Image (tube, helix red, strand yellow):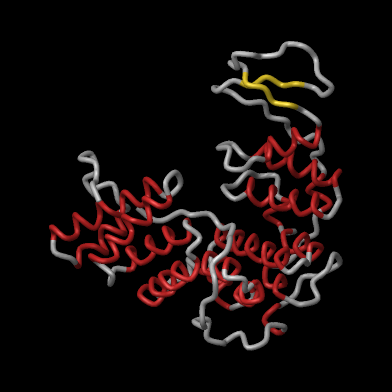
Amino acid sequence: MPIPDDVTGDEIDKDVRQELQSLPKGLAEEVSRNLVMVARLIDEDPEGAYAYSRIALRLASRVAAVREAAGFAAYANQKFSEALAEFRAARRMTGSVELWPVMADCERGLGRPEKALEMAGAPEVQKLDKASQVEMRLVAAGARRDMDQLDAAIVTLQSPELASNSVQPWSARLRYAYADALLAAGREGEAREWFAKAVESDKDGSTDASDRLAEMDGVEFVDAFAEDEDDEDGEGAQVTVSEEAGTRVPADDDDAADDVDDVELADVATDDVDDDIDGGDLQDDVDDEGDDLDDEDGDDSTGDAPVRPRS
């Protein structure tokens, strides 16, 4: 596949570049350029990213960064069996646990939420950094919802990270997931509070929290530059937004976080998690935690974890 002339391969992460040093110089450059294309396209053109990842994989299948990129490209295309196989290969090569949450989400995508919960209670989770532990919590909550355990999903998301007033990279998605679960449970008042908090922390517009909040408030958004803009008042309030700026509704309840009970991440895999769950050690409750996770793959469906390959 053609690669734009402005892509040199030097754009890749220094750690990936170091991995590619094991290859001949010309081959390393070709692989790196394909990896850059994977990272460029994965959000806007996942099929294109997948095609470039297959080229890189054909050229350098023994490089962990290539296997990881191929996994994320497959994941973005909902090819969860293939993604899981690539992530497992990358993990075997590096010994790192950083891919654990997305591997668990692949299990969800394959229709195996119980396996995802088993992974949420595995010792590997304790080795994850804070951001990855939050990601693991999101996956575990999603698995609970897959199993129609909505109350357990809500409890799973309750954590110090959720209750904190500080804004971290994961704050918007965590608050959004909590609000969405509350809304699904019919707790509309609480859901509105947390959608508002998600909007407050979503500086990059990574969620549609503002739209969800507006929908709950009966607000209709209209294109300011629409040719047939209607200036007459409608039944609901109207908010005009431009391409340069949107309307954000801030949270009006600063005490909402005070109502969230902390739940240890290790607890999310227990079978009896409920609204009154107390913190504890999940490891005593997870059966066969040492089972081989490399069992057979099923049919692909849908997952929720973000796609962020290294490049």
Judge left or right: residue 24 versus residue 280: left
Residue 60: % across, % down: 25, 67
Can you say whether 36 is above or below 119 in the image?
A: above
Residue 82: % across, % down: 44, 69
Q: Nearer the viewer, residue 35 or 12?
A: 35
Q: Nearer the viewer, residue 34 or 248?
A: 34
Can you say whether 200 is above or below 184 in the image?
A: above
Judge left or right: residue 187 versus residue 166: right
Single out the residue that lies furthest toward the front. 228
Q: Nearer the viewer, residue 309 or 46?
A: 46
Q: Would you identify the image quadrant in which residue 27 lies?
A: bottom left
Single out the residue that lies furthest toward the top. 231
Q: Would you identify the image quadrant in which residue 149 lies?
A: bottom right
Q: Residue at x 54, y 22 (%)?
A: 244
Residue 249: % across, % down: 73, 30
Q: Residue at x 13, y 57 (%)?
A: 26
Can you say whether 49 is above or below 82 in the image?
A: above
Q: Residue at x 53, y 54 (%)?
A: 306
**How many discs mark residues in the rendered view?**
0
Q: Residue at x 80, y 41 (%)?
A: 192
